[in-house]
Amino acid sequence: MAKWIAERTFDCIDPLGKRFRAVARIGMPTMVPRDRKLSAHAACRVMLEPLVSERAHGGIDQFQALCLAIDLVRKALKTFVAQGGRVFFAGTDTPIQLEDPSFLPHLDLERLRQPKKKGVQRKTTRR
């Protein structure tokens, strides 16, 4: 069982229109000792349920293993979108930017069309 160090949820719609929640999880990168012809390397657990089952993703060191695990999540989401799915920032109908390093949503044009609300002005009393 992996120790998850990061988690992000996405709201998704599959090509048939079914809405579901996808959960990305990244595990703590660990060093794997040398084994016969394989040199020592690092690996971390990664999953994007229900799209990608839990698996180890490795690199030459812990930093690279972590970067590649995040990249696997990004590539899986891109593949899902390329096959007709849609991915939204959790709890919204705003698509995420798949190229954004932090998976932020696109600007919400509907919210930007609304007039800006003025802040609450408080009366000040002089003493």
Image: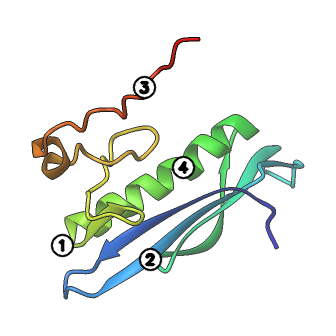
Asked whether the residues under the numbered discs 3 and 4 touch, taking CB atoms below 8 Å apart as contact, a structural biologist would say no
For label 4, the residue is: 70
Q: What amino acid does circle 3 point to?
A: Lys
Q: What is the C-alpha distance between the residues marked 1 and 3?
A: 54 Å
Q: What is the C-alpha distance between the residues marked 2 and 1?
A: 16 Å
User: How would you rate the neighbour count of disc 3 (Cα within 10 Å): few for under 14, some for 14-19, many for 20 or more?
Assistant: few
Q: What is the C-alpha distance between the residues marked 2 and 3?
A: 46 Å
**Where is the N terminus found, in terms of image quarters?**
bottom right
Q: Decide which of 105, 65 is in the foreground and name it.
A: 105
For label 3, the residue is: 123
Asked whether the residues under the numbered discs 1 and 3 touch, taking CB atoms below 8 Å apart as contact, a structural biologist would say no
User: How would you rate the neighbour count of disc 4 (Cα within 10 Å): few for under 14, some for 14-19, many for 20 or more?
Assistant: many
The image quarter in which residue 83 lies: bottom left
Mark 2 or mark 4: which comes first in sequence?
2
**Where is the C terminus found, in terms of image quarters?**
top right
Q: What amino acid does circle 4 point to?
A: Ile
User: How would you rate the neighbour count of disc 2 (Cα within 10 Å): few for under 14, some for 14-19, many for 20 or more?
Assistant: some
Q: Is residue 96 left or right of residue 73?
A: left
For label 1, the residue is: 84
Secondary element at image label 2 = strand
For label 2, the residue is: 21
Mark 3 or mark 4: which comes first in sequence?
4
Q: Residue at x 38, y 45 (%)?
A: 104
Secondary element at image label 3 = loop
Secondary element at image label 4 = helix
